[in-house]
Every structure is written in structure tokens, then in C-alpha cells.
Amino acid sequence: MGWPLAVSAALMDKNRNSLLKALIALAAGHLLAMAAILFPFTALLFLVEWQREIQIGAACLVIGLGVYLLFNRRHPRFLARVPPSRLALWSFLAAMAHGAGLMLVPIYLGICQTIETNSGHAAASDLMTGHAQIAVAVALAHTLAMTVSGGSLAFGVYHWLGLRFLSKSWFNLDLVWALSLILVGLISLLFVH
């Protein structure tokens, strides 16, 4: 959702390098939001015994957030108060407010499959060490996908379509985002073991 800010930065500076700098800042903020959500789940000791229930709860939470965003179309006002010079902060806050990291939790828990690992302290140790790499991989994969798709839109609008197109044909992806949260939650529920 931050790609219009990248286009705006490049158009204001009249410099295509500003587009790349803005995309890097947006990606950094988004990655930090993913880490802030995923890493606490990596360190939870009780996850070993309650993984299935936590995965179901996380999937239901994602579905609930999607339903909430489906009916509540207002954007959080605090996001409008973040200055354009702080794109990484805006990206972090927007990702947290829209549940981007939360969307990954049921998928991450499904990948880890801690129930089938050793029991007791060995499983907790494995969860905190081995699965931290999975959390990093999930966060990086999600951030890369977000940056490539948003960056492609930003480059296309900046290089070919321009500000006139952006101002006359603005489209809102809130409905798509809300439905994607619901879909990911439902898919996560289907694959709970």
C-alpha cells in the first residue's frame, strides 16, 4: 500500500533515485513489522504444548481482522500524521495497523510443526533456535513479495503513467486486503493438524 508514497517522493524530487530510496525505506519498515509479530511467537515456550490451539486462534484472529476491515473502511488517523520523510516508520505502522504480520502467524506456525518435534525443553530449544530462521525466511519472503509488487506499480506509474493518472484513477485496495486476510485465515484453518 506504500507504493503511492514512493511515486510521490520521486515526483516531488523529480528524481528516479528517490523512488528506489522510498521503496527501500518502505521495505525496511515492513520487514520490521513482520519481525515484531513473528519473533515473539518463535520464543514462546508454551507453543510446544498448545501449537494447534494457538494456530487456530491466530487463524480466527486473522479472519476477524479481515471481517473488521471489510466493514470498517476508515484508515487509522495516526498514519496521516507521519511525515513523508519517515517512510520506514509509516510502513512499519501501516503494516501493523493492517495486520500484515498477523497474517503470517498461522502460516508460520503451520510451517514449524512443533508438535512433531522432541518433547519438553528440547522442543522449546528447537523452537527458539531453529524456527527463528523460518521466521526470518517468512518475513523476508513476504517483504520481498510486497516490495516487488508495490515497486512494480510505483515504477510503472512514475515512468509511464505519471501523476495525472494517479490523481484521476485512484483505486482503493482495502476490500482486496480485507478479503485476503479472510482467505489466508480460512486456508490456515484448513491445514491445522
Image: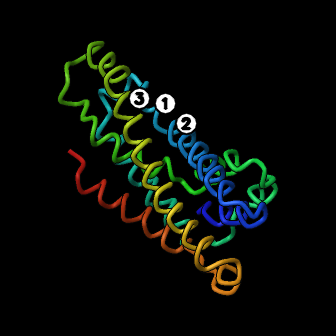
Circle 2 residue? 36
Which residue corresponds to mark 3?
Answer: 42
Is there a contact, CB below 8 Å, between mark 2 and mark 3? no
Of 120 and 83, nearer the camera is: 83
Kind of residue indicated by mark 1:
Pro
Q: Dot 3, crowdedness within 10 Å: few (<14), some or many (≥20)?
A: many
**Residue 39 at x, y = what percent?**
47, 31
- Give amino acid for label 2: Ala
| 2 or 3: tag closer to the N-terminus | 2
Residue at (47, 62) in percent of width and height: 149
What residue is drawn where x is 34% and y is 34%?
A: 134
| Secondary structure category for the residue under label 1 | helix
Q: Could you tell me if the residues under marks 1 and 2 are in contact, i.e. CB atoms within 8 Å?
A: yes
Which disc number belongs to residue 143? Answer: none
Circle 2 crowding by C-alpha within 10 Å: few under 14, some 14–19, many from 20: some
Residue 74, picture quadrant: bottom right
Locate residue 39 relative to residue 126 in the image: left or right.
Answer: right
- Name the residue located 24 percent from the left edge and 48 percent from the top edge: 192
Which amino acid lies under the numbered mark 3 shown in the image of this protein? Thr
Q: Which mark is residue 40?
A: 1
Rendered view: 169 above or below 17: below
